[in-house]
Image (cartoon, rainbow, N blue to C red):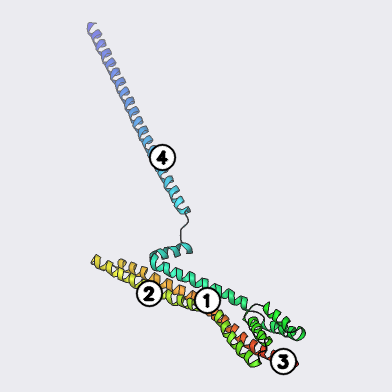
Amino acid sequence: MKKIAKLLVVLLMAISVNTVFAQDEATDSTAAQNDTTAVVQDSTAVDSAAAATDTAQTAAKEENTKEETDVPEQSGLHYQIKKKFIEGGAGFMGVILLSLIFGLALAIERILYLNLATINTKKFIEKFENALFNEGIDAALEVARNTRGPVASLYYQGLMRYKDGNNLDMIEKSIVAYGSVQMGLMERGLTWIALFIALAPMLGFMGTVIGMIEAFDAIQKAGDISASLVAGGIKVALITTVSGLIVAIILQIFYNYIVSKVDALVNSMEDASISFMDILVKYNNKK
């Protein structure tokens, strides 16, 4: 019996020890699982935070890109002209710009003057002749005085000479002389426009030569021929030449237009002077 009791005690102790070990292993396994879950959760949280940071950075980049895209590119004509003006150098480019401004001012003044001096010559001659034959010399003088232009001034001066008692030969000579005076008034300022036409490209060429000298000086200081250095210097040097040629072309167009207007007015004056002498001869015979 004692042996059986000892065996039962040993069995009970073995079963209890196994149970304790089983519980410890289960506890350790559960703790390990919990630790693994925590690590996974921490890793997931870190990944989520990194993903959120990347998303924020991407959004910021997109916003910056959008802002840069929304900024208008300065590629207009005004910006390009200003850029080339600065690249060409303020000295020569400023003088070329002044040539353009003064030349255009003189050209516009001449165009306005000549357009105001242009009248319907045929209608004026008819009105003058009717006033002279129907109302007398004073009425014809009033018509000529109230009409603008060199033709009317020519008629006024000629009729004044006739009123003062000059003969027809003297009147014809005075008309020719006064016509030369009127032609000089119409051509006033053309020499200055021609000067600016010649001056602008010469200033451009001078700026180009000086720019080339500066480019070669830069090559000498560098001690090596760099394609970018040479090309940049030549490009800047040629800007003044292009600007001078553009100014000369613009002023030349205005100059030719003014010369054509002057020639038209001179031809009109010559025809009108012949008609005036015919009118005086008819009026003199009528008396």
Nearest to viewer (mark 4 / mark 3): 3
Structural crowding at the residue carrying mark 2, measured as other residues with C-alpha within 10 Å and reported as few (<14), some (14–19) or many (≥20): many
Q: Observer-nearest residue: 19 or 155?
A: 155
* Residue that label 4 marks: 52
* Residue that label 1 marks: 254
Q: Which mark is residue 113?
A: none
> Is tag 3's residue or tag 2's residue first in the polypeptide sequence?
2
* Residue that label 2 marks: 205
> Is tag 3's residue or tag 1's residue first in the polypeptide sequence?
1
Determine the CA span between mark 4 and mark 2: 63 Å
Q: Could you say where residue 83 lies in the image, as x and y percent from the top left?
A: 42, 63
What residue is shown at x 48% (from left), y 69% (from top)? Answer: 101
Label 4 close to label 1 by CB (< 8 Å): no
> Is tag 4's residue or tag 2's residue first in the polypeptide sequence?
4
Q: Secondary structure at mark 4?
A: helix
The amino acid sitting under disc 1 is: Phe
